[in-house]
Image (cartoon, helix red, strand yellow):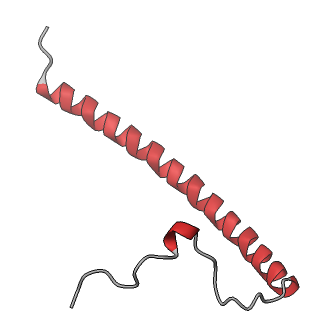
Amino acid sequence: MKINKEILLTILLVVLVIVSAVQAIQLNILSKRAEIGSFVEAAKKTSSASSTPPTGTGGSQLPQNLQNLPKMVGGC
């Protein structure tokens, strides 16, 4: 049984359209979750910023194995 090239290309095109549609739906869902999450994180940051006293360290602490790395690597 020999498959016609036009039928094969049509099947391939339909599969690609279906995969694209599924990915578009997943991207839409993911972006909606990110928007909802960003609003929740922004609310948490504003509420925790007002209740947390400053530590005075000026930044976050690095893990012990990353504290002794050189500041610059290579270059002139």
Asked if residue 11 lies left or right of residue 64, the reply is: left
Residue 75: x %, y % from top left: 23, 86
Asked if residue 10 lies left or right of residue 41, the reply is: left
The quarter in which the C terminus is drawn is bottom left
Q: Residue at x 64, y 58 (%)?
A: 33
Residue reaching furthest to the top: 1
Asked if residue 73 lies left or right of residue 37, the reply is: left
Residue 68: x %, y % from top left: 48, 76
Which residue is nearer to you in this view: 41 or 27? 41
The image shows a total of numbered marks equal to 0
Asked if 39 appears above or below 34 in the picture, the reply is below
Residue reaching furthest to the right: 51
Residue reaching furthest to the front: 68
In which image quadrant can residue 36 be found? bottom right
Q: Residue at x 45, y 47 (%)?
A: 23
Residue 39: x %, y % from top left: 72, 72
Asked if residue 19 lies left or right of residue 45, the reply is: left
Q: Residue at x 84, y 80 (%)?
A: 47
Which residue is nearer to you in this view: 7 or 41? 41
Residue 61: x %, y % from top left: 63, 77
The quarter in which the N terminus is drawn is top left
In which image quadrant can residue 46 be found? bottom right
Q: Residue at x 43, y 76 (%)?
A: 69
Which residue is nearer to you in this view: 11 or 27? 27
